[in-house]
Image (tube, rainbow, N blue to C red):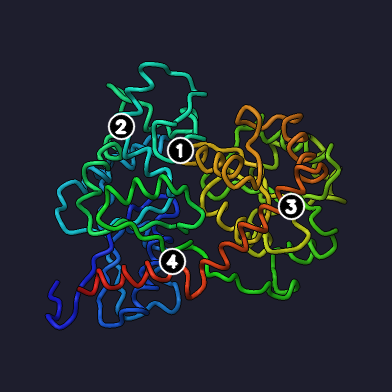
Amino acid sequence: MTISSEKKHVAVYVFPFGSHPVVLLNLVLKLAHASPDILFSFIGTQQSNQPFFTKPNIPNSVKFYSIHDGVPEGHVLGSHPVEKVDLFLQAAQKLNVPWIPVWPPLSCSLSAHFYTHLIRRKCAENNAKDRSLDFLPGLSKMRVGDLPDDIINCGEDETLFSKTLASYGEVLPKAKAVVMNFFEELDLPLFVEDMRSKLQNMLYVGFLTLSIPLPPLPPSESDETGCLSWLDKQKGESVIYVSFGTTVTPPPHELVALAEALEESGFPFLWSLKDNLKGVLPQGFVERTSNIGKIVPWVPQTQVLGHDSVGVFVTHSGCNSVYESICNGVPLICRPFFGDHVMTARMVEDIWEIGVKMEGGVFTKNGLLKSLNLILVKEEGKKMRENAQKVKKTVLDVAGPNGKAVQDFKTLVELICH
């Protein structure tokens, strides 16, 4: 490309999996409005860029470019998502440009990738999942079992993705800055101090998928899913909201256990469940619970979590879902699946104390009933709701014009402008 010498040019190279493209595009749009003289090239695969081609209000300074995803022509992908990631990384390895990486997942999970080799040595000495990570600054309440599989797994079975993550301690200190999709005020102080000692700049720019303060709820009748109108009819803080994002589906026996617990609890529930999975549910469940439950294939999640009738969010612990719950002050029941989910659930339960993780890490009927009763009935649940409101207030305060996220964003703008 030929770029005018009068304008600076920033190439944004996307990791085209999960929610990463959305997070990065939101950051780019903020930067484009703050720096109108800079050109941005948003580089992803055809598949990851496709949803943005029709997105309104994209500034002229942001251009999309689609690159090869690394999958050889005619290659049939297996069922495991890591294969696609590995092929993409192989195609990307030859790049050699100055960079400012953005870390979309939970911030403290970065430490685990920084210390992968140390963790593996410690685990070789004692592979107990309940062992504390007290040898990592700020992570003493975390456990070995909270770590992503890519950190623990090594040897012949280690994937290219895992090897790439394990190299962060060597490459990230060379970056001009590392941008965190988080607020420093919610983080672990010793972790922050440790990472700052290793990185040139560590910039917390807030939740990149949310505009804070959240906009007011729209008129209920404008919600085509009918969720808001249905929630209007329920009592305050009484509804169980269930959703596992767009990439996670619990195994059939867990969906059955979840359904049985919802039915026996007697609480009203709103469940975001794809239509093709309804056949897995217990026979007659949908009909028997039609007076207290609503099942829809898609939910306007941020709006639902902002409704006064929602009392608890049953989630996979994906960071975007947890951040939306935090911004609305809703307690959580976490059933983590992979990646940083378990570390996020640990933060929810033991650091912020705004929810619980499922006993044994999976859905069972009795386990979920116990968690629902704890949050919606018992005194401990009242304390969690109070804590959730405190965390929400913290976010509202620090997201304001005098908060550190605004200052760190200004620093980011300066870095890309000079």
Residue at the top extreme of this rendering? 125
* Residue 400 place in picture, x, y as percent: 51, 72
Q: Earlier in the sequence, mark 1 or mark 2?
A: 1
Three-letter residue code for mark 3: Leu
Q: Tell me whether the residue at label 1 lies in contact with that at label 2, contact meaning CB atoms closer than 8 angstroms.
A: no
**Relative horizontal placement of residue 305, taking residue 76 as reference (left or right):** right
Q: Tell me whether the residue at label 4 lies in contact with that at label 3, contact meaning CB atoms closer than 8 angstroms.
A: no
Three-letter residue code for mark 2: Thr
C-alpha separation, residue under disc 2 versus residue under disc 3: 38 Å
Three-letter residue code for mark 1: Leu
C-alpha separation, residue under disc 1 versus residue under disc 3: 35 Å
Q: Could you say whether the residue bearing mark 1 is in a helix, strand or loop?
A: loop
Quadrant holding the C terminus: bottom left
C-alpha separation, residue under disc 1 versus residue under disc 2: 25 Å
* Residue 171 place in picture, x, y as percent: 22, 46
Q: Which residue is mark 4?
A: 404
Q: Which residue is mark 3?
A: 270
* Residue 179 place in picture, x, y as percent: 35, 58
Q: Residues within 10 Å of mark 3 (few under 14, many from 20)?
A: many
Q: Which residue is mark 1?
A: 139
Q: Tell me whether the residue at label 2 lies in contact with that at label 3, contact meaning CB atoms closer than 8 angstroms.
A: no
